[in-house]
């Protein structure tokens, strides 16, 4: 008999304590008007939030097969709104619209539920607009916010939410999930689980796509090749260009479809002329698309930075002789050579340089190309060393 969680909980990997808590909530124990789901990227915060929403709308607390469950999971339930942004932040105008929706009674007999993914991207003004709705909620409205950590959310907001903390799934849990849902060989599932460091979405991409695996192999191969300024500049340029290419492949089709929809809504296609209102609408669309493209590039770069961190983390583990499983087991030979020409202290400094570059790009809007060049120089191996 399968021990995997059933119903709406089946997509939550390695989160048994959380599943038990959410089941109790759906049954009426510990219910709150606002929840804050926190956990590392890829831990399944958004999936957990949607699963709870489905369970709250379900007469059987999350059977997974009734009309309420299937529509919530499909994103089409009238009383469940999932707010996700393609931009770098969630602004006050978007939140005010949500607050207006929160004041309305649900169309059905149960709850109106608003899920805010990336609540850490709320601007200060947006947080202030949200706070009053959470302080004085409607009787049948539930807010579910998702963020990496509690510190990423304004203290006055998090203090009014029930905290649900998710953990990084173990390698074995992720591998079993991939083998079950993606029908991939056991060795590939194990590799994807290790390489993703517990990030479910990343693990799926690695298990499904050879091109994704090849891009990662290129990135994790750089640390032993950064023997001079030239290789550092080449690596930085390659990372940035690959990120732009991957982001463009993701967004190009969507951009084209949005432009076609805009043209159709203003009658440009049918009538062959542009009404006065078309110009401002097109400008706003293009601005939103540029912002989305920038975020996509940063997301791809960020993923590569975490892959680089895993290499130096493995070097530290190998140097310590701890025997802990390596993320990049297939690189053990390169890692041993890296350990011979570096010190644990210098590799800790390299990890710090990676996180500094990440902060510069994500928090301080430093151009990605510039931040990556500076970072790669900081990762350079000692003069004269040839791993």
Image: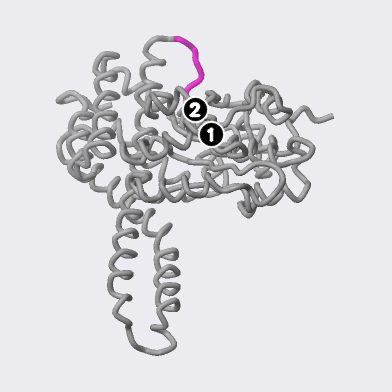
The residue that mark 2 highlights is: 39
When the figure is inspected, residue 88 is found, relative to residue 220, above or below; the finding is below
Name the residue at 32% across, 83% down: 274
* Name of the residue lying farthest toward the bottom: 271
- In the displayed structure, 262 sits above or below 336; it is below
Percent position of residue 59, x then y: 78, 40
Secondary element at tag 1: helix
Observer-nearest of 280 and 147: 280
Whole-percent x and y of residue 261?
45, 73
Q: Position of residue 260 (x, y in %)?
A: 43, 74
Q: Is residue 156 magenta?
A: no
Mark 1 = which residue?
Answer: 45
Which quadrant would the N terminus be assigned to in this image? Answer: top right
**Quadrant location of the C terminus in the rendered image:** top left
- Residue extent of the magenta highlight: 322-326
Between 111 and 310, which is closer to the camera in this rendering? 111
Disc 2 secondary structure class: loop
In this rendered view, identify the residue nearer to me: 343 or 351. Answer: 351
Query: Is 324 included in the stretch rendered in magenta?
Result: yes
């Amino acid at each position: 008999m399968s021990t995997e969680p059933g119903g709406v909980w089946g997509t939550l990997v390695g989160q048994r304590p959380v599943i038990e808590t959410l089941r109790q909530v759906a049954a009426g124990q510990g219910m709150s008007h606002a929840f804050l789901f926190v956990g590392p990227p890829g831990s399944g915060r958004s999936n957990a939030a949607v699963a709870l929403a489905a369970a709250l709308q379900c007469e059987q607390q999350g059977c997974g097969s009734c009309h309420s469950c299937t529509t919530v999971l499909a994103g089409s339930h009238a009383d469940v709104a999932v707010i996700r942004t393609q931009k770098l932040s969630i602004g006050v105008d978007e939140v005010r619209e949500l607050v207006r929706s929160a004041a309305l009674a649900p169309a059905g007999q149960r709850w109106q539920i608003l899920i805010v993914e990336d609540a850490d991207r709320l601007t200060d003004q947006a947080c202030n607009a949200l706070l009053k709705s959470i302080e004085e909620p409607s009787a049948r409205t539930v807010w579910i916010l998702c963020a990496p950590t509690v510190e990423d959310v304004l203290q006055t907001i998090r203090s009014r939410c029930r905290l649900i903390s998710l953990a990084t799934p173990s390698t074995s849990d992720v591998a079993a999930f991939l083998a079950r849902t993606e029908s991939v060989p056991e060795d590939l599932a194990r590799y994807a689980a290790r390489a993703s460091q517990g990030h479910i979405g990343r693990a799926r991409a690695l298990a499904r796509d050879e091109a994704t695996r090849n891009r990662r192999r290129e990135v994790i191969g750089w640390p032993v090749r950064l023997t001079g300024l030239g290789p550092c500049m080449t690596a930085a340029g390659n990372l940035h260009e690959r990120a732009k290419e991957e982001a463009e492949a993701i967004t190009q089709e969507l951009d084209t479809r949005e432009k076609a929809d805009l043209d159709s809504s203003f009658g440009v296609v049918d009538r062959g002329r542009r009404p006065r209102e078309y110009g401002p609408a097109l400008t706003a669309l293009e601005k939103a698309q540029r912002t989305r493209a920038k975020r996509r590039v940063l997301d791809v770069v960020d993923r590569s930075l975490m892959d680089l961190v895993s290499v130096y983390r493995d070097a530290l583990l190998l140097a310590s002789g701890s025997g802990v499983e390596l993320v990049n087991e297939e690189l053990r030979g390169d890692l041993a050579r890296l350990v011979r020409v570096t010190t644990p202290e210098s590799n800790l400094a390299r990890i710090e340089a990676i996180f500094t570059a990440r902060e510069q790009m994500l928090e301080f809007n430093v151009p990605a190309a510039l931040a990556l060049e500076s970072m790669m120089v900081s990762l350079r191996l000692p003069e004269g060393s040839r791993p």
